Image: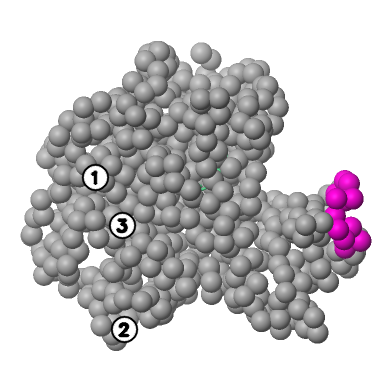
Amino acid sequence: MADGSEKRGGVDPPSSFAEGANVTASDCESLRAAGWPACWERAAELLDWDRPFDAVVDDDGATCWFPGGRLNASYNCVDRHVAAGRGDEVALVWEGKLDETRTYTYRELYDEVNAFAAGLRDLGVGEDDVVTVYLPMVPELPIAMLACARIGAPHSVVFAGFSADALATRMEGADSEYLVTCDGYYRRGTALDLKRMADNACLSVEYPVEQVVVNRLDAESPAGDYHRYSDVVEANEGTEVEPVARDVDDLLFLIYTSGTTGEPTLVRHVTGGYLAHVAWTSHAVFDLGPDDVHWCSADVGWITGHSYAVYGPLALGATTVLYEGTPDHPEKDRLWRVIERNEVNVFYTAPTSVRAFMKWGSEYPERHDLSSLRLLGTVGEPIDETAWRWYREHVGGGECPVVDTWWQTETGGVVLSTLPGVDSMRPGAVGRSLPGVEAAVVDQMGKRVEAGQSGELVLTRPWPGMAQSLCEGTDWGARRTRTVDGEWQYDTGDKAVRDDEGYFHLRGRADDVLNVSGRRLSSTEIESAIIGVRGVAEAAVVGRADAIKGSEIHAFVSPASNVAGDEALRARVREAVESAIGAIAVPDTVTFAPSLPKTRSGKVVRRYLEAIANGEDLGDTSALRNPEIVGELESLLDE
Ligand code: WT7
């Protein structure tokens, strides 16, 4: 294998990397030969079990992975590394606003996780009680998660950018009576009041909520009825809490994501399969080991941060980096400074960020010594070839393999990617499916399409990290599993093409889910917030292509009769979305329309609106009841 050489449009990993990789070509071969499900045993072997599992999967449909096994996630991510004599090694490095940093060794992490777990128990948190965690990127966020896992209390982390209403819906949906939050946090140098949001959410929840509040702003403690995080931890200093042995299919956490309905979708992940999956993919795809410093730049409030900033790297005893700030504050070289200072080995980020770095220019990474990096990754949306090459050249020094990893909240961990020491990289394509994962591209009937043809991406075998909600085959909105000619299929909601070498090229969503800056938002959820505004008759939300963000949010709003589509209404629309979901979902553009394009049965056709927003050719509009509206909307946008 030539060093970083290109052939047939592919880029081979440097031989130095390939030789030392956790998974080498011959390992990969034997894994593929072992096949599904046997090869997943390797994943489970990365963990310590309180009771060994009886089989890799159960025999009634593979809905339960590693049946019979018992384990604790907090033990696997913390205790066992201390027990192995690695207590003085760094588990977590936190980079806060400006130049403030905090470091936790595995021993320090152990102490604080234990103290907080004891504190949660004192508050009455029992096994299976859901604890909501609404925190920005502070060390107390992973600590709270691990403390919950220790006592068998599933956590439900809600991204700190969500509004009070969104938090309340998520707490009620999970019957969660406990909330860990903070007084506020810094964003671009300004202090934001998170406690007020949390209080507003608790007011609208139907039952009393116990709050624990982290002091982040160093301001006076806000008034009210709650427990201070520092008091809880101090009162339990030195207390050790026995990790609760959990059944493999006991819940580890809940997480909400956006589906195709007007409500957030609840996804449940279990202890055994999930932890094995994220540990294994951290080992095989991110090539992590105990000596590595890993930085996954995603917010821990999303699944990416759960799997690859917390559970995966800590299960392997690596160092994980947590960064509170934004990439361009105080300067556009901030991330590169963090990498240099912490000698980061593996960096994982979103294509939207890479496109922003590229726009800012290579002078920023060039100011820093990035030679500690040995592997780069991306996730969240397709990365185009130009951005991929820029990333590899200017961040990866032209040497680092780049893994483009495809997965979803529902899959728990990576399922499609190249293996960095094995596969040739193909810029613009994710790899094949990982060993033990089976994927295909099918038509709407679930029949396979030919290589090179576009269709829907499905997974045709269960995998350990799959959400429990999916194993049970319960109905979760429009995303489903089905059986086609006796074959089980999970419909991912994505469009893809598989090439003749088995590499998948992702082509965006097939459903009404938007991808804005690598974040998943539901058109329907935004629409239902807009429709609730007084004076609005109808609304439809679509994505408009944007060079940096992937998509921008474009709302077409039709005002009620005798209501003017003016600035006041536009402001009400924006406020309604901000308060129902959060600032991340506020439309970039609001176009007032006399009506929306509809089928004869009265269904709004988003596809036409998407074409209009993107200035594309609409094709045949004769199926519309009101084809004349199309020209009207086009001329409105030209103004
Ligand atoms: C959706 C899942 C779990 C990772 C972060 C987002 C898109 C994810 C890729 C990729 C093209 C990708 C898909 C997927 N996506 N990774 N490498 N290439 N598209 O998790 O919020 O559940 O979103 O993100 O559309 O369905 P999520």
Tag 1: amino acid? Ala
Q: Nearer the viewer, residue 273 or 207?
A: 207
Residue indicated by mark 1:
73
Tell me residue 167's x, y (percent). 42, 68
Callout 2: helix, strand or loop? loop
Tell me the amino acid under the disc marked 2.
Pro
Q: Nearer the viewer, residue 29 or 389?
A: 29
Residue 591, by quadrant, is bottom right
Q: Which residue is mark 3?
A: 155
x%, y% of residue 376?
Answer: 48, 37
Q: Can you say whether 425 is above or below 444 in the image? A: above
Task: Report, in whole angstroms, how far the alpha carbon at label 3 lies from the one at label 1.
Answer: 12 Å
Q: Quadrant of ligand 1?
A: top right
Q: Residue at x 11, y 70 (%)?
A: 235
Q: Nearer the viewer, residue 131 or 427?
A: 131
Chain part drawn in magenta = 618-630
- Above or below: residue 187 compared with residue 382: below
Would residue 635 be counted in the magenta stretch? no
Q: Name the spot of residue 287 as percent of width and height, x first.
A: 38, 31
**Residue 624 colored in magenta in the image:** yes
Picture residue at 61% right of the left edge, 31% below the top: 446
Relative to 464, residue 306 above or below? below
The disc, 2 or 3, on the residue closer to the chain's N-terminal end is 3
